[in-house]
Amino acid sequence: MKVGVISVQGAVPEHLHMSRVALDAMGRKGEAIAVRRLDDLRSVDCLIIPGGESTTISKLLRKFGLFADIVAMGMDGVPIMGTCAGCVLLAKKGGEQAERTGTELLGLMDMSVDRNAFGRQRESFEAPLEIEGLNDPFPGVFIRAPMITSAWGSCRVMCRHQGEAVMARQDNVLAMSFHPELTGDPRMHQMLFSLV
Ligand code: GLN
């Protein structure tokens, strides 16, 4: 299996590392590559869109000519996981902040998000999360995290933190407002790879 990590800005090396850990843990042969060019993008079996700054990532996806192909891959059923800023980019609606900054979203998931929604005094925090399909809590690391404010159609919320939706799935696409690549726990990456 070939895993691609979109590599225009943000937490790329951490995702590459965790992808390799997860492949090992699953006993699956594979590789994880940083994706910055169209031919690399077209060669992968699944894709990770990392955290970072969603406005910047969005602009760079256009500049590097990757934007339309990511949308097409998602609609074709290629498994995609977006974390934090990646979660914002997967949404159909990005709330007031995305509108104000003119952030163009990939729009692969029937959900709306609110950027940096957890409030100033709690810009970064950790919390154990109960996630659908996992037996034990997952260590949630939140950094200026978005909140999923609504989900419709076939988009399903998979996890809430203090009542707020922080993870969702729509068929082949997973989005979470936290950072699984910054933990020692490969289960979110394994969840993505199990869809391949
Ligand atoms: N606040 C950032 C955004 O809205 C996301 C932060 C992150 O990815 N850690 O784009």
Image (cartoon, rainbow, N blue to C red):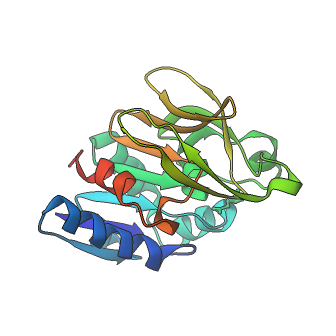
The answer to whether 133 appears left or right of 156 in the picture is left
* Looking at the image, residue 5 lies above or below residue 171: below
* Looking at the image, residue 195 lies above or below residue 164: below
Q: Position of residue 108 (x, y in %)?
A: 47, 40
The answer to whether 113 appears left or right of 118 in the picture is left
Total number of numbered labels?
A: 0
Quadrant in the picture for the N terminus: bottom left
In the picture as drawn, the residue positioned furthest to the right comes out as 121
Q: Position of residue 163 (x, y in %)?
A: 68, 29
Look at the image and tell me whether residue 105 can be seen. no
In the picture as drawn, the residue positioned furthest to the top comes out as 153
Tell which quarter ligand 1 is in: bottom right
Q: Residue at x 81, y 54 (%)?
A: 122
The answer to whether 58 appears left or right of 25 in the picture is right
Q: Residue at x 28, y 48 (%)?
A: 78
Residue 52 picture quarter: bottom right
Q: Position of residue 38 (x, y in %)?
A: 34, 70
Residue 92 picture quarter: top right
Q: Residue at x 69, y 34 (%)?
A: 162
Look at the image and tell me whether residue 33 can be seen. yes
* Looking at the image, residue 153 lies above or below residue 100: above
Q: Residue at x 80, y 48 (%)?
A: 97
- Front one among 87 and 165: 165
Q: Position of residue 187 (x, y in %)?
A: 35, 53
